[in-house]
Image (cartoon, helix red, strand yellow):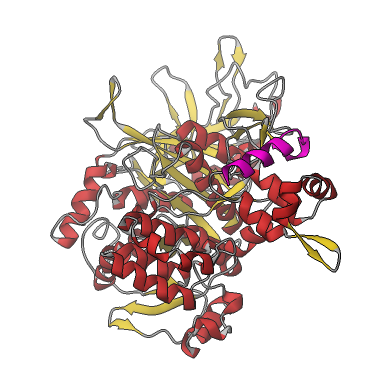
Amino acid sequence: MQNLQTDLIELLKDQDNLVVDNQLNKNKIIEAALKVEPFLISLLIKNDTFKKHFFQEVENVLVFDKIKFQRFVNNKSFLPDSYTAFKNKIGLAINDDTTDNFIKAKNDVVLVWPHKDCVLEGGQTKEDQKRNEIFWNETLAPDNVDRLLDAKAFTNFKKYDKDGKHKVTEFTGDENLILKGNNLLVLSSLLKTHRGKIKLIYIDPPYNTGSDSFQYNDNFNHSAWLTFMKNRLVIAKQLLSKDGFILVQCDDNEQAYLKVMLDEIFGRVNFDNCITTIVKTEGRRYGNLAKTHEYILMYAKNLDNAKTNEINKVGHKFRYKDSNGGFDLTDLRNQNANAFNSTNRPNLRYPFYIDETSEDENGFCKVSVAQKEGWLEVFPITVNGNESVWRWGKEKSKENQEEHLISRKSSDGVYRVYQKYRSNTTMEKTVWFNKNFISNKGTKELDSLFGKKVFGFPKSEYLIQNIIHICTNENDIVLDYHLGSGTTAAVAHKMNRKYIGVEQMDYINTITTKRLQKVIEGEQGGISKDVEWQGGGSFVYAELMQYNQYFINKIQEAKTKEDILSVWEEMQDKAFISYQFDKDMFNKRLDAFKTASLQTMQQYLIEILDKNQLCVNFSEIEDESFNISEADKALNYSFYKN
């Protein structure tokens, strides 16, 4: 075998169309074989060894056995089995040539990394951390990518409300949803139901720190993380409404790279802000300085359409009061006389007229832009030789003078014109230093709710409340596809927003949904008292309908070799196995397989499963081989219809 592989490499190594980055590429060879490219057939058939192995004579005609050849080339010991148009390095490149030229004299730059043009098949579960990554190239494997991302069927539907758990009979389209499964597959399924409908996406993904849930077993952990994120963010953008926002929380491990990648996906023009939020006041001992903060990168689907809400001024009291309520004062004069003055803004310099006889106990006098007999004429003052101007034009001042404008004499004896400012809100700032936002606050909230520690480092409800308040209004839809303990869904529920939460770990049933049930019951932790939460509402739970994933779970749960062999017997009859796998040959060598370690046996059986069949595609629910109940079929049709 090894000599045959060496001979093939020697035969093909000078074929430029089979070479990527100066190295013969396995996937390019397979692509040429499947297309039965004449140049490849000519090379192989002229070599007696390859002629013998990969051609069969049929009625005096030699026929190329491309399946046998493909299996041979796919052997793990042959060549690197990942194809990517991007070099094996990470950096910035000009947007029109990502493979050769890094930053030059152009402004349009993007981040490139190995496998950027691929879909990472794997998930992020702890159980997956020792598997080899499979990257489906978008160009070479479009059918695989399409099948992987096709809308999936759901099962195990349940509705939770104040009366407990119920069966789901139909979907109306406005349900709160908690969905269990690989978030890439769930997101691609939601395109069929929620494209352009999500007002806010907030995610707190694994930070790729080496100790979180993103632990891939390869030499491209960094690039695998970027591919993992990109695959999901590209779909997330399609789910956002035209005025929607996406906020991604991260730390310094990936922040700089993530920012450039988000610029490319959402457009630099749609970058809104980078929020710095203090998460640990005493700091974590990383490097030479104690790290106190994380980042929240904020983008809009279209910044021209996206508007945020202001936040309340905590503890604010108005200084003055009139018949319309409380107010503060803000000077109507533009304070920047150097930039805005009578020279370049002549239309904003005009007189007001002050009725000095109307002065009240606060020293306030009536004003008018129309000249009145006996009223004092007032212009904005001159600063450093520049004649100041007003912030409002004359027509706006005329419309608002009765209700919103007053005048008062200042300490220097000059009358100034003021706007009555009645808002009790202010624009949020980009640095969040609020003791209610720190990580420890979220931990205490959840510990108190469950009476014990159940989850590591959940986000504070107050932090999520601030995000949801700024970016949404009541009944808007909020999506979190790294749901974790369920903070985003819990806060959205209490704030009367619709929500979709996606999580694939099993704690979704022991922590996340239990937490939301407590919310429905009216728990008083977190933000409950602030929003006067009294309970109520509902959500629907569903899971991706597993197929090959069922076998993966059984393999991983196996405790003995006998368990593994039992799973193999079931797999032969029911599982979708990779077309590259020779089942008959494997069974002939089953005794040798039994001598391997339990871990090796588990890894091998997982490897031969067709990962494109982890879950059942919605388009195939009528296939009798999946044995789907009529009730599940009806609910899937109802879900996708609405």
Camera-side residue of 133 and 453:
133
Left or right of 358 on screen, residue 241: right
Camera-side residue of 297 and 426:
297
* Residue 158 on image: x %, y %: 37, 79
Residue at position x 52%, y 62% in the image: 611
Residue at position x 39%, y 60% in the image: 593
Q: Residue furthest top?
A: 384
On screen, residue 505 above or below 233: below
Residue at position x 14%, y 57% in the image: 452
Left or right of 415 on screen, residue 22: right
Camera-side residue of 567 and 530:
567
Q: Report the magenta stretch's main SS.
A: helix
Left or right of 635 on screen, residue 252: left
Chain part drawn in magenta: 1-19
In the picture, which quadrant includes the C terminus?
bottom right
Q: Is residue 9 magenta?
A: yes
Camera sees residue 544 = yes
* Residue 45 on image: x %, y %: 80, 49
* Residue 62 on image: x %, y %: 82, 60
Q: Quadrant of residue 374?
A: top right
